[in-house]
Amino acid sequence: MNDLAEVALNAARSGGADYADIRISRHRDQRISAREERVQSVSDTESYGFGVRVLADGTWGFAASHEVTPDTIAAVADRALAVARANRAAQRRPVELVHVDACRDTWRTSAETDPFEVPLGEKTDLLLAVNAAALAVDGAQFCTSSMHFQKEEKYFASTDGSAIDQTVIRTAPTFTVTATDPATGKFENRTADIHPRGLGYEFVEQCDLVALAPRMAEQAVEKLAAPSVEPGPCDLILHPTNLWLTMHESLGHPTELDRVVGLEANFAGTSFLTLDKLGSFRYGSPLVNFKADRTLPGGLATCGYDDDGCPTTEWHLVKDGVLVDYQTIREQVLWPEYREARAAAGLPEVGHSYACSYADSWGSFPFQRQANIHLEPGAEPLSLDDLIAGTDRGIYIVGNASFSIDQQRRNFQFSGQVFYKIEGGKLAGMLNDVAYQAQTPAFWNACDAICDQRFWELGGTLYCGKGQPGQAAKMSHGAAPARFRQIHVLNTRREV
Amino acid sequence: MILSDAQARQTIDTVLALASADQVRVNLGGGRRANTRFALNSVTTCGDTADLTVAVTACYGRRHATATTRQTDRESLQAVVERAEALARVAPEDSEHMPELGPQDYLDTDPWRESTAAATPTRRAEAALEAVQAAEAHDLTS
């Protein structure tokens, strides 16, 4: 690998590049899906190639190929230089990279069992057993189940002197049960509250899918008869399986510095968390602390180094309810407006990248993507049962479903998988057709209780879309159940 | 990577010759993709990527599976065929599986566009600059 990398770096140097890096990566992807009593599809793809990025006269150039040979690597490095030189005329703000120490290192996932080494038959048998367990419940008519595994083996080298070898594994089992009522033609789905992890096949085993299936099926059936919610202001208790997506959209994306300054506006917009708010804007109640962290074992965005070759780290985005930082990559740290905003807020210079650069393939340009972002658990002991017991009237929401958010991520609405009425501090039956709607700061300022560390768990996604051309990044979001006072609840079935 | 008809045929024939499954489908896809992205009146990200995918679907009766590779040397093609066949052998029967259609006559198509092929990095940057300058002339951002 080192010899191949040197071909690119030497070609870039001799061509006049100020900086260059190469990523040589192999991506394995296995997907298995089953519906009722049959396996629907099995696919196992492998993608191997390299991408060369050069910085010449303050402008990026990037080129890539699936042909990993010295001749092609040299030619692609030349092509990347040609792209950089051509783009120079349209470059208004020269790219300047913050210093990063040269690093030669190997980083490996914490996965225990490589899912690609597990026999296919074991996986299909499990999926069919899940479907059978779900369909054994009266009223459950359909069940689809799947497993998705990813393995990224990535070698990064740069003219800074870094050479980094990393292996990341991600595992995503899931299933959805559908219950129908033939008399009314009504149907309801229940997707299991299982979110992908940066773990191996041991995560599939930990999920105990077969044991979970009847419970999900029973809830799908129960939803058919659940009364429709009465809209209006209501106290909400949100389970982490619901809250992760709300955090992702209302805090994760708006703290991406490229959205903040307006360099990214697609995939739901820029950000209301503008630089003038840094250090003073009350994003949430004093209980609300958000930390970004690409080092958490099992996180989907967890790795040793980002695709700029910067070591991953953890840091606060919101501290005691106040916006205190953003997510950055190497070329953003020296942006004058970011440094000035920090100075104006009385915050010290960071001086290093938060390592949020990611490319979803050897053929993709690395750019800013979300880290794992977590709502820190409450400092005081508080269980979910205690939280419900302390709520007179409200709704408890589990699981995530559809959502929408505006172009600055200020106004949103989110639904869920299942909803329970809370009356007198007790769960009082299932509701249906619930979504909550709020302005982001009002919502997080209405947070008055967060359960403790014992109830903290990870959600996350393998398919966060961003960029042109679009790329899919992966990240986890951890939270404990939390309560939000007097949030507006919608009835999603009601016709207006 | 943009292949000629003969190159594509050679890759496909190699895969078919290496395969031993009851039925085999080969999908060959790829090309050259290039982009120049700009925002706030300045170029941001860019790319010029050559890619090729060989997808092999192997079927044994109603058992089937697909594997892919990006490499076209004989060793890689052998490996992807073996992977597809190994997966297909252990895949459960798919009661909805339909057999391949058999030889077909397809219409000739001519999707090649010289103007697209001529969109070099310089031409793309010029196009971006045109938009940027038009915006700047009106004190706008593009």
Image: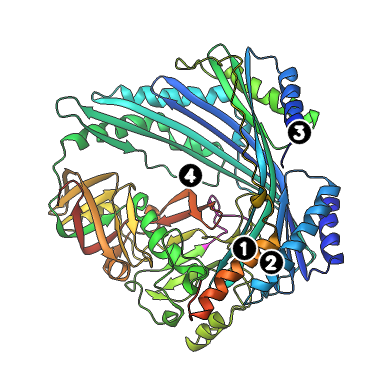
Find the magenta span and give its range: A293-303
- Return the residue at label 4: A196
Q: Is residue A203 left or right of residue A111?
A: left
| Label 1 and label 4 in one chain | no
* Alpha carbon distance from label 1 to label 4: 29 Å
Q: Which amino acid type corresponds to the residue marked 2 in the rendered image?
A: Trp
Parent chain of label 1: B
**Which marked residue is nearer to the observer: mark 1 or mark 4?**
1
Instruction: Specify which label sits upstream in the sequence, 2 or 4.
Output: 2
> Can you give x and y, in whole percent of width and height, for residue A2 in the image?
83, 53
- Return the residue at label 3: B72
Which numbered disc covers residue A60?
2
* Alpha carbon distance from label 2 to label 4: 33 Å
* Alpha carbon distance from label 4 to label 3: 33 Å
Is A172 one of the magenta-colored residues?
no
Decide: is A123 above or below A192.
above
Check disc 3: other Cα within 10 Å, few if <14, some if 14-19, many if 20+.
many
